[in-house]
Amino acid sequence: MRVALVFALAAALWTRAAEAQKQPVSKGRIAGEVAAGMLGAPVGFAVGYTIGSGFRPHGSSNTGVALGFAGALVGPAAAVNWVGNGGPSHGNFGATVGGTALGYAAAYLAFPVARKLPWKLKTIATVATLFLPAVGATIAYNSTRK
């Protein structure tokens, strides 16, 4: 059931992205957006945690964790937006953040399913779930691109 929901959500977002595009997007730009989104999550978490913990390297605080999670949400969206805005078209940043959130939700649903697969598929599927927030941000960005 979870897998069907994840695939239905991805298909709906992908269809929406295909309808909204006015100019074609190169495969290289899409790959760059996904790669930047993948780097945006840990960097965003680190920046948010550092700010939330008051710039103390060994400090631990609930505020640091909360801002770290906020940074992990905004980081992939900001990275995808940065790469995507390198050309003549621009997408909606709010929608990109929403796509990142949907990607995290899809990863939350798909990860337990991926862990129940046979050994080789388990590894591939588990690694693939790590890409879902960046993919969600990329799809949402390109669906609002003008």
Image (tube, rainbow, N blue to C red):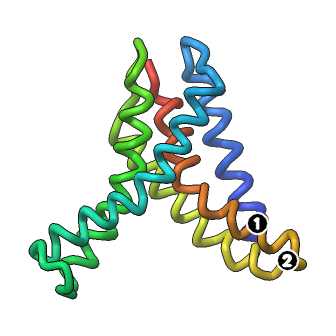
Quadrant where the C terminus sits is: top left
Q: Which residue is mark 1?
A: 125
In the rendered view, would you say 12 is above or below 127?
above
Vertical relation: 41 (above or below) 28: below
- Report which quarter residue 71 is drawn in: bottom left
Q: Quadrant of residue 85?
A: top left
Mark 2 and mark 1 lie on one chain; the one further toward the N terminus is: 2
Amino acid type shown at disc 1: Ala
* Left or right: 96, with 2 as reference point: left
Q: Which residue is mark 2?
A: 117
Q: Quadrant of the N terminus?
A: bottom right
Residue 13: x and y, percent?
61, 41
Q: Position of residue 41 (x, y in %)?
A: 42, 58
* Tag 1 secondary structure: helix
Q: Which residue is more in the foreground, 68 or 23?
A: 68
Relative to 90, is 14 on the left or the right?
right
Identify the secondary structure beneath mark 2.
Answer: loop
Q: Are marks 2 and 1 in contact (CB under 8 Å)?
A: yes
Say left or right for 70 vs 117.
left
Residue 55, position in %: x, y? 12, 72
- Residue displayed at 55% across by 23% down: 20
